[in-house]
């Protein structure tokens, strides 16, 4: 996927969520160029130092991305996308936002993954949804385990065997897998 330049409508919808000043209070140069650089790099698997020189200094862009991530920009944008109408200007750049979220997952951690899953934007995660950790184990347990009281009193061993099997399966599902096989990753980007 090659990113296209941000349209005026998409940038106008993105602008209220951006940080216009550095922590020292200095005005950030060209916000549009920085966001286009972030989206251009987010569409690749290249490191930050691979940003072309026409986008600006790589360390400056990477620092701005980290500041935006720690400020919660990607969470805010995902919530806006979740609550917005189909013709909202951010919908046009939703795939770019999802790609940037994939890079932000490392910085935001499990709560960010849980929020992405809760909102249903699985394409914003770094791998196939079935291979990623599922932080909603308790919801899965409540839905999967219904124990009849009479069987527990009777001491039915088959019930306990089924219960343990279900718990093992849910535990494996909640933990995801440690390494996603290369063949799976190639088709997922």
Image (tube, rainbow, N blue to C red):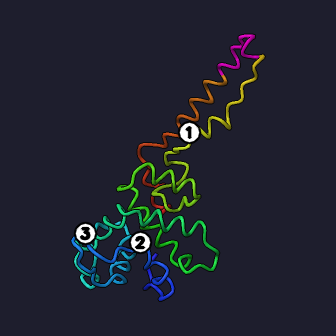
| Residue lying at 43% horizontally and 61% vertically, measured from the top left | 102
Neighbours of disc 3 within 10 Å: few (<14), some (14-19), many (20+): few
Mark closer to the chain start, 1 or 3? 3
Answer with left or right where residue 117 lies relative to residue 69. right
* Residue 156 is one of the magenta-drawn residues: yes
Prevailing secondary structure class for the magenta stretch in the rendered image: helix
> Which residue is under mark 1?
137
Asked where in the image residue 25 lies, by quadrant, the reply is bottom left
Single out the mark in the foreground, 1 or 3.
3
Mark closer to the chain start, 2 or 3? 3
Q: Do the residues labelled 1 and 3 touch (CB within 8 Å)?
A: no
Single out the mark in the foreground, 2 or 1.
1
| Residue lying at 76% horizontally and 23% vertically, measured from the top left | 148
Residue at mark 2 to residue at mark 1: CA–CA distance: 31 Å
Q: What stretch is highlighted in magenta?
A: 151-161
Give the residue furthest to the bottom.
8
| Residue lying at 75% horizontally and 10% vertically, measured from the top left | 154
Element at label 1? helix
Neighbours of disc 1 within 10 Å: few (<14), some (14-19), many (20+): some
Asked where in the image residue 64 lies, by quadrant, the reply is bottom left
Asked where in the image residue 173 lies, by quadrant, the reply is top right
Q: Percent from the top left, x then y, of residue 155?
A: 71, 11
> Which residue is under mark 3?
23
Q: In this view, does 136 lie above or below 158?
A: below
Q: Is residue 173 above or below residue 12?
A: above
Q: Is residue 83 above or below residue 130?
A: below
Mark closer to the chain start, 2 or 1? 2
* Residue 180 is one of the magenta-drawn residues: no
Single out the mark in the foreground, 2 or 3.
3
> Which residue is under mark 2?
43
Answer with left or right where residue 108 lies relative to residue 90. left
């Amino acid at each position: 996927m090659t990113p296209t330049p941000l349209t005026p409508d998409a940038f106008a919808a993105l602008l209220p969520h951006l940080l216009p000043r550095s922590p020292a209070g200095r005005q950030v140069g060209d916000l549009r160029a920085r966001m286009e650089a972030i989206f251009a790099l987010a569409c690749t698997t290249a490191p930050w130092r691979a940003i072309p020189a026409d986008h600006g200094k790589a360390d400056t862009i990477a620092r701005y991305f980290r500041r935006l991530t720690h400020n919660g920009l990607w969470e805010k944008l995902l919530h806006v996308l979740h609550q917005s109408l189909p013709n909202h200007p951010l919908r046009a750049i939703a795939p770019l936002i999802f790609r940037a979220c994939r890079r932000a997952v490392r910085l935001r951690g499990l709560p960010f993954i849980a929020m992405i899953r809760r909102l249903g934007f699985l394409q914003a995660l770094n791998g196939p949804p079935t291979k990623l950790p599922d932080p909603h184990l308790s919801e899965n347990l409540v839905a999967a385990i219904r124990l009849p009281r009479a069987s527990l009193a009777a001491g039915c061993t088959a019930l306990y065997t089924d219960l343990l099997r279900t718990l093992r399966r849910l535990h494996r599902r909640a933990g995801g897998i440690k390494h996603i096989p290369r063949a799976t990753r190639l088709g997922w980007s």
